[in-house]
Amino acid sequence: MTERDYPALLRQFDLFDPAHEEWKYDAFAYAREHCPIVRTEAGTGFWLITRYEDMRRILEDWETFSSVQGSPAPTPVRLGPLDADPPMHTGLRKLLNPVFSRTFALRYSDEMRRNCRDIIDGWIDDGRVDVINQYAGPFVSRTLARMVFDEDDPEKMARAIEVVDRVTEEGTPESFFDLAMLSAEYLAAAQDHPPERDGVLRALVTGEIDGRPVPEDEALGSLNVIFLGGLDTTKSAIGHIAMQLALNPELESRVRDPRWVRQDMDEFIRLQSPVATFARNVTRDVRVGGVEMKAGDRVLIRFDSANRDDAKFPDGSCLRFDPPRGGNAGFGLGIHRCIGAHLGRVQIAIAFEELLARVTRLELDCAPEDIVWKPGIANCPESIPVRFKKVSS
């Protein structure tokens, strides 16, 4: 097999194989042009969905492409609402949407800013920082701990981060079981929370769907998803944007402009989709993009490939801010769009406002090709080391 034998590479593509991170974008680009829906026999076997329009069609037809048991890796736990279809999915989203609204997130904005400043204080005099592990990671975990879990114990959140990392990178039944145990502990503790402590946990333990309490497995599944999404995707987005600023110094002025959050943020998110992929199950024979799929087949939706589809986003493998281009699937798309997207956007905006108040002239502290991206469901680098100059007081 030659280096450019993309058909052969695609037939063995495994989202959990670290080596495949090195060539996946080139292979997806080949697929979009020559074989946009291609079969891989890795794992349980999937149809890879690489083009935007095919992705959209599948995501808008939940009856034909079910999310039930939609995890790309077999899992012994629920991941609702991510792996639920209507009406259960509808009920869970209705219950959780209020505590993941932009308004709810902004209640904690002052605390988020204090956390950013405290974290920056720890390395501001060093002139360099690993944006992922010394800034984005601690900031996101502190926000999640306080806002979602009302948790002040850093050791407990460190354990949560370790469990989430294993789930997203390995996808083993053992890692999912550990995640379920973690979620169960928090839900059990929430039973004794006083009524004035509103938020996610209270919504899950006291809320109702169609007049009945939330089923225990669905409550656990919802918390599993919040752990996974909350700790990984926003951290990745912050890290990637920082990397782009380090590689393209002219972008700093754009991100310093408060208006960047309206449209520029979406372009950063489009290019390096925090949510890389998720699966669907085919419920009946169907034809998509000229490919015959059978009931029981599984499809692997590559949000990160669809977001670089030139047919939807011209010159899709590059950042292009003008004119603005919407509709990206960086946080998913359709009824299963990431429930924490509003929170994530608030966190990203605050993270860069506080960062750029203290530092300027970011430069990558390694060769770009030395950045290692983790395999799995999210697109997240292991580290992003940068150098910087302190902003003059």
Image: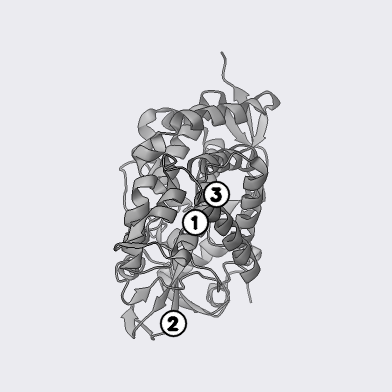
Quadrant in which residue 367 is drawn: top right
Quadrant in which residue 290 is drawn: bottom left
**Element under label 1?**
helix
Q: Which residue in the structure is indicated by mark 3? A: 231
Gap in angstroms between the C-alphas marked 1 and 2: 28 Å
Q: Position of residue 23 (x, y in %)?
A: 58, 63
Q: Residue at x 67, y 27 (%)?
A: 127
Residue 127's disc number: none
Judging depth in this view, the residue of 255 and 110 nearest the camera is 110
Judging depth in this view, the residue of 393 and 360 nearest the camera is 393
| Residues under numbered marks 2 and 3 in contact, where contact means CB atoms less than 8 Å apart | no
Viewer-side label of 2, 3: 3
Q: Residue at x 65, y 68 (%)?
A: 174
**Element under label 3?**
helix
Q: Which residue in the structure is indicated by mark 2? A: 297
Viewer-side label of 1, 3: 1
Q: Which residue in the structure is indicated by mark 1? A: 223
Q: Position of residue 119 (x, y in %)?
A: 61, 31
Task: Specify the color scheme.
Answer: one colour
Q: Residue at x 50, y 32 (%)?
A: 112
Mark 1 or mark 3, earlier in chain:
1
In the image, is 91 to the left or to the right of 216?
A: left
Q: Residues within 10 Å of mark 1 (few under 14, many from 20)?
A: many
Judging depth in this view, the residue of 351 and 309 nearest the camera is 351
Mark 1 or mark 2, earlier in chain:
1
Under mark 1, the amino acid is Leu
Q: Is residue 226 above or below residue 19?
A: above
Of the 4 image quadrants, the one containing the N terminus is: bottom right
Gap in angstroms between the C-alphas marked 2 and 3: 31 Å
